[in-house]
Amino acid sequence: MSQSQADDERPEDSSLENNTVSQTSHILFGCMMKEPLTPLNLEVESDYEVGKGPPKLDVLIIRRTGARWSKTQLEFLPDGIRQSNCKHVILELKYTESINKTAIFQTIGYLGSYLRLKQFKPENVCAFIVSSKSPQKKMLNQIGFEQTDIKGIYRSRDCLLSNIQLISLNDLSDAPYNLWIKLFSSKINQRLSVLKRILAFDLKKLNKGLVSILVKILNFWNIIGEISMQRIQKDILYESGGISDEVAGWFLSLFKPEDRLRGLKPEDRLHGLKPEDRLNGLDLKIIEDYLQKQRKMKR
C-alpha cells in the first residue's frame, strides 16, 4: 500500500474489528441523527425491540408524520433518504464490516420483522444499509445492486429487495446535507475534508447537542487511533487559509486537556512553554533530585 493510500483509508487493523468499536460507532451514529431531527417533528429511535422483550434490532428508525419531508428536515437528511417517500425509514450502519450477502440477509430480516410487528404495507417502510466502506464491484454484482443516478446510492434489480437501498458514505456528494453522515466514512482524508467544511459553519448557532456529539466523534477517532487530535489541529484548525483562529480556539476549548494531548510525546506536550512554566507546580525536591542525577551523569 502506498503512503497516500495509507493516509486516506481506515487502517485494516484487527483491533478495529471488534464489538466495542462497532457498538460505540452505532451509539454515536444514532445520537448524530437524533439530535438534529427530533426537534424537527421526526421520531428517531435506536435499539428497536421486536416484541415485548429481546431481541432488539441494532438499527436506527426514523418516522415521519407529515406527507413529505419538510425543508428543515431535508437540511439534515442525506441522499437516498431525502428522495424516499417512505414514512418509516430503517437505517443500519456498517462501520467495521464490509457489504456482503450476510449483510443483505440481515437487513431483510430487520425489514420483515418491522413490517410484521407494525403490520404495515411494504411500501410504507424502506431500509438503508449505511456502509462506511466502499462496496466492492464484484460483491455488488453478486447481490444485484447497481448505482442509481444519485452518487453513492445503490439499488437492487431484484423486486424482493426493492425496499432496500445501499448508501456508500465514501461516494456520497459533498452537499451540505450529506456532511454529517459522512463523518462515518472510512476514508480518513475525506473525513478531514468534511470536518473542515462543517467547522466553516457558524457552529455557535448550531444545536449545542449536535456540536457536543461532534466533539465525541472526534474523541472517538482519537481514542481508537484513526485520526489524532494533533492531526486535526495541524490539518484543519491551524492550516493556512483554514478556519479563523477565533473559531479554532473556541472549538478546542470544547475538549478536555487530556483529550487534546492524547498521543503526544512528552517533549511535544511541553513544546512552546517557557522553562519556568515547565517547572511550575513541581515539588522543589523533585527538581533538585533531577539536577543531582544529571550532574552525576555528566561526571
Image (tube, helix red, strand yellow):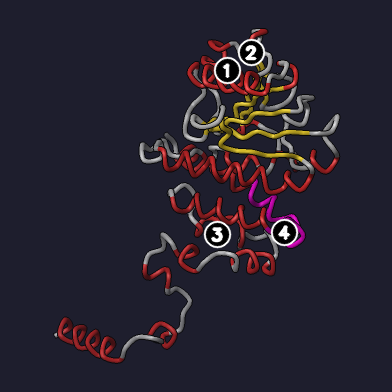
**Reading the chain from its start, which is encountered first: label 2 or label 3?**
2
The residue type indicated by label 3 comes to Lys
Residue 46 shown in magenta: no
The residue type indicated by label 2 comes to Leu
Quickly name the residue at label 1: 108
Q: Secondary structure at mark 3?
A: helix
**Residue 65 placement: quadrant:** top right
Q: Secondary structure at mark 4?
A: helix
Quickly name the residue at label 4: 203
Label 3 or label 4, whichever lies nearer to me, is 4
Please say if the residues under marks 1 and 4 sit with CB atoms less than 8 Å apart: no
**Reading the chain from its start, which is encountered first: label 1 or label 4?**
1
Quickly name the residue at label 2: 161
Quickly name the residue at label 3: 234
Could you tell me residue 86's position as x and y percent? 76, 25
Residues packed near mark 3 inside 10 Å, few (<14), some (14 to 19) or many (20 plus): few
- The C terminus - image quarter: bottom left
